[in-house]
Image (tube, helix red, strand yellow):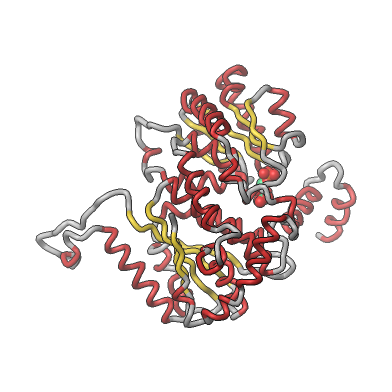
Amino acid sequence: MISFNNEKTFGFISKENVSAYEAAVKDAQEMLEKGTGKGSDFLGWLHLPSSITPAELADLKATAQTLRENCEVVIVAGIGGSYLGARAVIEALSNSFAWLEDNKKNPVIIYAGNNISEDYLFELTEYLKGKKFGVINISKSGTTTETALAFRLLKKQCEEQRGKEMARKVIVAITDAQKGAARITADKEGYKSYVIPDSVGGRYSVLTPVGLLPIAVAGFDIEQLIAGAVEMEKACGADVPFAQNPAAIYAATRNELHKAGKKIEILVNFCPKLHYVSEWWKQLYGESEGKENKGIYPASVDFTTDLHSMGQWIQEGERIIFETVVSVDKVNHKLEVPSDADNLDGLNYLAGKRVDEVNKMAELGTQLAHVEGGVPNMRVVMPKLDEHSIGSLFYFFERACGISGYLLGVNPFNQPGVEAYKKNMFALLNKPGYEAESKAIQAKL
Ligand code: PA5
């Protein structure tokens, strides 16, 4: 199970002030459990891990097997909460170079529908030419432009390349039970489909088929992912006392830091495979808390890479930041620094040491430097990079986000701000139904 530590924030805020959140956290936990807070229609994620049935998991695994047997490439079409969780797990657990190998054990997973770049989509359609590919089309609303546009191209190409019958077998839809174009198409074409529950918002949906199906297609153990989340569901529950509840303490500490003027939280990793875990986390906290002119700005860095770029700002820039480090305790492979007769690079003092020992000392050295430089530091430690740990990490962050949003006084489950750009884009593109907006926006240009 993951562990959490906030000791290195206490030079900046007091332990007493963090403990003083106990009553407010209790209220927040009660709002989550009883559905009495803002956004209570979207609490379906709260007990998702413990309520998924073996039959549901078996069905997802069977669909994943069909895609694995019939596809060398699978495109996950989705944006925001409809792809970031799956990508976070798949990139964290995949061999970094497996997709370059000739004899692949697993289908190559590619992501689309998360941008509107013509070059990206052109290059994707070129790459797919002659390949046995399938598509998982993921959209809760079923109407998101980025995803719908990519799916239109991919469906056409899949049908042309693989024939209508095979396309029907290797296209899967994950969408609303009734509404939206993705649902209508899935029903009309007879695709296998899964429902995203109404009560689960996009950014909280990784433990539904939205995340689970792509993860299973990529060859990872979704039962272990859920088992890790179940463990954390218990550890972060409303019945767990504040002082022993990692989600409660994390939520309280970051809110107290915010009060003390720390406006930006930087999620840090020392393992590039965790890059998309940070992207998932940024969406979760950014969309949940950034509203009503409030909220901690969620940023992320990959160390030690970014120590050679953003490290300067973090060490000496404006003191409005704090760091939350996601650390992996045990690596999965062993590699020692070799000895070299000439020692021209001066690295013989490291000969025989594990590369991870060097990385861990970089991690410790960075923590000491940043804390001394005025950056409070929290740590979330995963025992290792596997499905179980990531499942527990996901639930920890989700639960803490719900609590933290309520502590901040916002609705952590809506995202009204993401509509503004869509309205303008539709007006500029003269989408039917947007005639008045088109006129108004043209007048502004
Ligand atoms: O968290 C959210 O709700 C959003 O970021 C959505 O996940 C994103 O906009 C994609 O929406 P949809 O699944 O409806 O295509």
Q: Quadrant of residue 356?
A: bottom left
Give the residue drawn at x 55%, y 65%: 241
Number of numbered discs: 0
Q: Would you say residue 29 is visible in this rendering?
A: yes
Q: Quadrant of the C terminus?
A: bottom right
Judge left or right: residue 10 versus residue 193: left
In the drawing, does residue 283 fall left or right of residue 243?
right
The N terminus - image quarter: bottom left
The reply to whether residue 117 is in sight is no
Residue 41 position (above or below residue 173): below
Q: Residue at x 72, y 23 (%)?
A: 188
Is 384 in front, or is 29?
A: 29
Residue 84 is situated, as x and y percent measured from the top left of the image, at 56, 48
Residue 178 lies, in percent from the top left, at 76, 34
Please state which of residues 16 and 108 is positioned toward the viewer in this rendering: 16
Residue drawn at (72%, 42%) of the image: 141
| In the foreground, 365 or 29 | 29
Judged from this view, the residue extending furthest toward the left is 341
Residue lying at the far right of the rendered structure: 436
Q: Is residue 99 above or below residue 132?
A: below
Of residues 53 and 186, the one nearer the viewer is 53
Image x and y of residue 2, in percent: 44, 57
In the image, residue 347 above or below residue 94? below
